[in-house]
Image: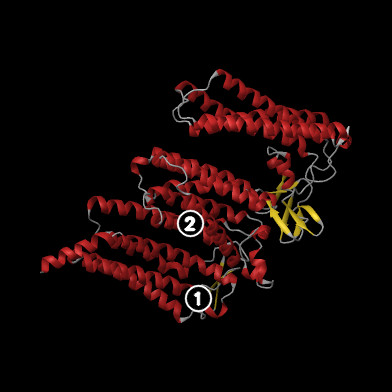
């Protein structure tokens, strides 16, 4: 029996390799030849043979799993896991795996060339182009359905938690899981999945760039720099948010162990986008930087949707434990994996019939929905009313809202910091940054079109007014407050008005007030001198920025621990967002005020 299993395994692998080798070779030759505008009948027959070969190869590959494990036939009930005690249908699983693997192999062999031709062969015959598009979309549906079939058939015979990587050390080659880690050279699926997500971003972005510039590879150098910047930003953001909880009492080298998890998407996306935007602006002279960033940034949502599955392999970013009945519609392997959660080096198991809410999965789905809404609803249906930069703002707004909604449902083991306030504050950064970018883009276009924007300073002043309410806001982590000896307190939070306030806090309050008055004054100054009004605007933006920095250090600076830092971030985040808005509006005048200043000098002369 084992001999047959090994034979089926080897033959299946050879068939898959042969089918896809010839398939890729033929597709590459067809797409590369600009003269060919249609597929001939004999070529279509060859593709059909490749699909059949792939289907048989995958069927033999998965058949070998059952042939090499005859003991599976004796397993009639779940002995562990979330479905403990429930029966297992061996014949049904056997059939499901074989049928699913057959259709999966065929669908994959159809998807690869149809997708390739759909993107690369613009001059294809119209009739064939229509059929290629149909095959492309239908194959995607069959890929998902057939994947569910064979994975469901095998799920009852797998060990959980599933492997999350492998390590090479003195003991040789070792498969690792979230509950069984090893020292040595370690390749984590967490990192591999993140890399796949980043490459998908690059691929989608490259296709969008090709439609306008008719050239591939325009973003490769930007990707090479922006992706590592995003990884560094994600790690720094995580380490800062969890310093007291996870790193303060450990050796410093643990800061660099990213293969064990510990990357914050909020930080990674922010730094990656920032570096990428700067490179698009200053290193690629032939590109429209605003258009490029507007096209590329929404694809980050697809990368994040894929990257979140790294949390699946690490058994992390879950919510609280709930009954499995709420999630029986999900595949068995996914449900069984969610029965186990990790916290640091320990592994936790939900009770019988219980699983942890898969927040990573919910966020992944919402990221995909957000991508299509931003690219096709905002980018196409609402194109008439949008400005360059709106989709960038919509990305920050959408993802910030998603995280703001999901963060309170996180298991406390996966909170950033000692509570979830740090993550909520980060989410607010994204929401308000998104609003600021959208507003700045529209105000910029309005000014360029109408050459007038004297009311902008009043907008800046109005945006800064809410900062004066920050000292009175309750903590995000509490829902009740109490009074005591003239002080206002919040349960589980920090003192909002107390004797511990430093002079820096008072200085911040005054600076924000002065910044508001400067913006109001610049409204009147602009009517007399554009150049003087511009400098007045810059002064207001600088004062508001300095005020927000003082705000951070102005609250009980002698007790600057992580919890206080998290709560103070709430006020700082809002202040910084409004300061950014004010600065963006001020910079609108940069080009025009220089020329206007010269005209004023000539007029006076």
Residue at x 27% of width, y 60% of height: 591
Please give the label number shown on residue 555: 1
149 vs 464, nearest the viewer: 149
Question: Relative to residue 156, is residue 209 drawn left or right?
Answer: left
Q: Is residue 421 visible?
A: no
Left or right: where 232 falls relative to 98 = left
Whole-number angstrom distance, CA of label 1 to CA of label 2: 23 Å
Q: Where does the image place residue 539, in percent across and percent down from the top left?
A: 31, 71
- Residue at disc 1, secondary structure: loop
- Quarter holding the C terminus is bottom left
Asked whether the viewer can see residue 381, the reply is yes
Q: Residue at x 52, y 62 (%)?
A: 425
Which quadrant would residue 44 be assigned to in this image?
top right
Upstream in sequence: badge 1 or badge 2: 2
Crowding near the residue tagged with mark 2, few <14, some 14–19, many ≥20 C-alpha atoms within 10 Å: many
x and y, in percent, of residue 396 in the image: 47, 53
Asked whether the residues under the numbered discs 1 and 2 touch, taking CB atoms below 8 Å apart as contact, a structural biologist would say no
Give the side of residue 103 with respect to residue 600, left or right.
right
């Amino acid at each position: 029996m084992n001999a047959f299993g090994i034979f089926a395994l080897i033959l299946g692998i050879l068939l898959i390799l042969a089918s896809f080798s010839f398939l890729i070779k033929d597709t590459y030759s067809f797409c590369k030849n600009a003269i060919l505008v249609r597929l001939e009948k004999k070529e279509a027959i060859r593709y059909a043979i490749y699909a059949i070969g792939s289907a048989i190869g995958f069927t033999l590959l998965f058949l070998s799993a059952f042939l090499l494990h005859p003991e599976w036939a004796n397993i009639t009930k779940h002995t562990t896991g979330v479905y403990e005690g429930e029966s297992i249908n061996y014949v049904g699983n056997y059939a499901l795996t074989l049928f699913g693997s057959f259709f999966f192999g065929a669908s994959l062999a159809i998807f690869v060339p149809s997708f390739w031709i759909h993107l690369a062969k613009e001059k294809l015959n119209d009739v064939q182009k229509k059929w290629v598009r149909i095959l492309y979309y239908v194959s995607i549906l069959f890929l998902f359905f057939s994947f569910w079939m064979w994975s469901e058939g095998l799920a009852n015979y797998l060990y959980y938690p599933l492997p999350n990587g492998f390590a090479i050390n003195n003991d040789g080659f070792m498969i690792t899981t979230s509950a069984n880690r090893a020292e040595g050279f370690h390749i984590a699926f967490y990192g591999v999945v993140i890399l796949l997500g980043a490459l998908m971003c690059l691929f989608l972005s490259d296709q969008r760039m090709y439609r306008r510039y008719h050239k591939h590879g325009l973003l490769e150098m930007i990707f090479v720099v922006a992706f590592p910047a995003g990884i560094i930003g994600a790690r720094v953001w995580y380490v800062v948010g969890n310093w007291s909880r996870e790193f303060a009492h450990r050796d410093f080298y643990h800061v660099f162990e990213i293969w064990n998890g510990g990357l914050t998407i909020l930080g990674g996306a922010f730094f990656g986008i920032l570096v990428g935007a700067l490179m698009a602006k200053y290193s690629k002279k032939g590109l429209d930087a605003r258009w490029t960033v507007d096209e590329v940034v929404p694809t980050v949502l697809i990368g994040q949707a894929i990257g979140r599955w790294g949390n699946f392999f690490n058994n992390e970013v879950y919510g609280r434990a709930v009954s499995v009945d709420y999630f029986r519609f999900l595949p068995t392997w996914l449900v069984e994996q969610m029965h186990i959660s990790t916290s640091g080096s320990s592994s936790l198991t939900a009770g019988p019939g219980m699983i942890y809410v898969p927040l990573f999965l919910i966020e992944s789905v919402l990221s995909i929905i957000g991508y299509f809404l931003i690219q096709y609803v905002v980018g196409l249906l609402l194109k008439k009313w949008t400005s360059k930069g709106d989709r960038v703002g919509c990305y920050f707004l959408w993802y910030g809202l998603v995280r703001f909604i999901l963060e309170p449902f996180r298991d406390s083991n996966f909170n950033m910091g000692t509570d979830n306030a740090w993550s909520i504050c980060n989410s607010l950064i994204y929401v308000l940054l998104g609003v600021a970018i959208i507003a700045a883009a529209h105000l910029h276009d309005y000014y360029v079109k109408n050459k007038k924007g004297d009311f902008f300073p009043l907008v800046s002043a109005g945006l800064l007014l809410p900062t004066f309410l920050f000292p009175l806001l309750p903590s995000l982590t509490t829902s009740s407050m109490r009074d005591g000896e003239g002080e206002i307190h919040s349960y589980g939070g920090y003192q909002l008005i107390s004797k511990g306030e430093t002079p820096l806090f008072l200085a911040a309050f005054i600076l924000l007030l002065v910044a508001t008055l400067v913006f109001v004054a610049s409204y009147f100054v602009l009517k007399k001198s554009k150049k003087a009004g511009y400098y007045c605007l810059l002064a207001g933006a600088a004062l508001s920025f300095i005020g927000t920095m003082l705000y951070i250090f102005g609250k009980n600076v002698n007790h600057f621990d992580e919890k206080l830092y998290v709560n103070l971030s709430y006020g700082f985040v809002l202040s910084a967002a409004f300061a950014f808005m004010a600065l963006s509006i001020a910079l609108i005048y940069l080009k025009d005020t220089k020329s206007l200043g010269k005209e004023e000098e000539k007029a006076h002369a």
